[in-house]
């Protein structure tokens, strides 16, 4: 039987409705308006789209939003000075510096400069460390979105064999940590595979839940999964464009073949993608509440 399709678009909509109410409530009761700033250096078209979506979603939910678009030749010193200013601005609760940054800027130094309390991406080492010891303030957005997709589609995570393909700092490592936590919506047995794994199929075939962030189209084929697996496809690969100039996207999983064996699967687009921005909004609300002593 073909798989149930896990719709990130629908689940993200549901969470955004909840957030909209929460934002209206903190505004009414506490006169608190969560504020998010995005900083974009350069003119990368994909990054411009992402930043635009973040701004649009902030407005739709009632979050105060500021956007700083800086030229590609901005110096690291100027960028750090802007971050310092934003760290001190009480209207701003969350700071997001869009990655990747131009080559002449040291990404690590920039991420370290963001006040961990305003680090709504969850990339600062303080927040990475807090997650690692099971005391997170902010969960990184894409992995948090994946956890929510599983929970809200009724997938049992506790005790499940979760296999992750990819070990990036943005997806693979943090989702492993999140699902490993000793708490509800986690408690999984986690395996992380990567480019140097000896026998990828051996691991992926054991998965009850397979999370793929490999960065390669169709890296997972039907012969690599077992019947009844739940598949979360984090990949976004551009295969080309339609004659009308629309991007043709595919994930890291051979969707058409794998959906015949899987119990449930996320599509690309419309799976993990819509969740990432939604979780950024959730982190911004949390940052505002933490700053106001409400959480
Ligand atoms: N670029 C691609 N994904 C992300 C993300 O989650 N956060 C930031 N800051 N930049 C990104």
Image: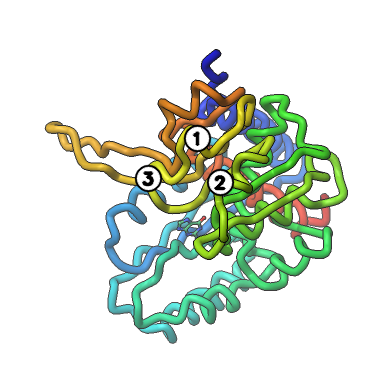
Cα distance in 3D space between marks 2 and 1:
8 Å
Q: Of circles 2 and 3, which is in front? A: 2
In the rendered view, tell whether residue 22 sits above or below residue 120.
above
Looking at marks 2 and 1 on the same chain, the residue that comes earlier in the sequence is marked by: 2
In the rendered view, tell whether residue 1 sits above or below residue 223.
above
Can residue 123 be spotted in the picture?
A: yes
Q: Which mark is residue 217?
A: 3
Q: In front here: 178 or 96?
A: 178
Circle 2/circle 1 CB separation < 8 Å: yes
Q: Quadrant of the N terminus?
A: top right
The spot of residue 123 in percent (x, y) is: 61, 65
Cα distance in 3D space between marks 3 and 1:
16 Å
In the rendered view, tell whether residue 172 sits above or below residue 276.
below
Residue on which the image places disc 1? 223
Residue at x 53% of width, y 81% of height: 109
Q: Which mark is residue 201?
A: 2
Q: Quadrant of residue 186?
A: top right
Total marks shown come to 3
From the viewer's perspective, tell me whether residue 33 is left or right of residue 265: right
């Amino acid at each position: 039987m073909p798989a149930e399709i896990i719709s990130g678009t629908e689940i993200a909509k549901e969470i955004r409705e909840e957030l909209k109410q929460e934002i209206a409530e903190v505004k009414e009761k506490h006169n608190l308006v969560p504020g998010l700033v995005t900083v974009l250096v350069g003119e990368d078209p994909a990054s411009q789209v992402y930043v635009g979506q973040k701004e649009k979603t902030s407005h739709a939910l009632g979050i105060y939003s500021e956007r700083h678009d800086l030229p590609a030749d901005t110096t690291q010193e100027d960028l750090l000075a802007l971050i310092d200013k934003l760290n001190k601005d009480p209207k701003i609760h969350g700071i997001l510096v869009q990655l990747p940054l131009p080559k002449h800027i040291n990404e690590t130094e920039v991420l370290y400069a963001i006040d961990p309390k305003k680090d709504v991406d969850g990339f600062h080492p303080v927040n990475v460390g807090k997650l690692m010891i099971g005391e997170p303030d902010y969960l990184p957005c894409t992995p948090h979105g994946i956890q929510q997709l599983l929970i809200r589609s009724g997938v049992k995570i506790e005790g499940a064999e979760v296999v992750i393909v990819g070990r990036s700092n943005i997806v693979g490592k943090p989702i492993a940590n999140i699902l490993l936590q000793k708490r509800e919506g986690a408690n999984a047995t986690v395996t992380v595979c990567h480019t140097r794994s000896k026998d990828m199929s051996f691991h992926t075939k054991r998965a009850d839940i397979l999370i793929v962030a490999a960065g390669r189209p169709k890296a997972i084929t039907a012969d690599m999964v077992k019947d009844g697996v739940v598949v979360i496809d984090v990949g976004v690969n551009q295969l080309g464009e339609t004659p009308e100039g629309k991007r043709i996207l595919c994930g890291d999983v051979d969707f058409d073949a794998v959906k015949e064996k899987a119990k449930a699967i996320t599509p690309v687009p419309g799976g993990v993608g819509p969740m990432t921005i939604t979780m950024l909004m959730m982190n911004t609300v949390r940052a505002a509440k933490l700053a106001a002593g409400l959480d």
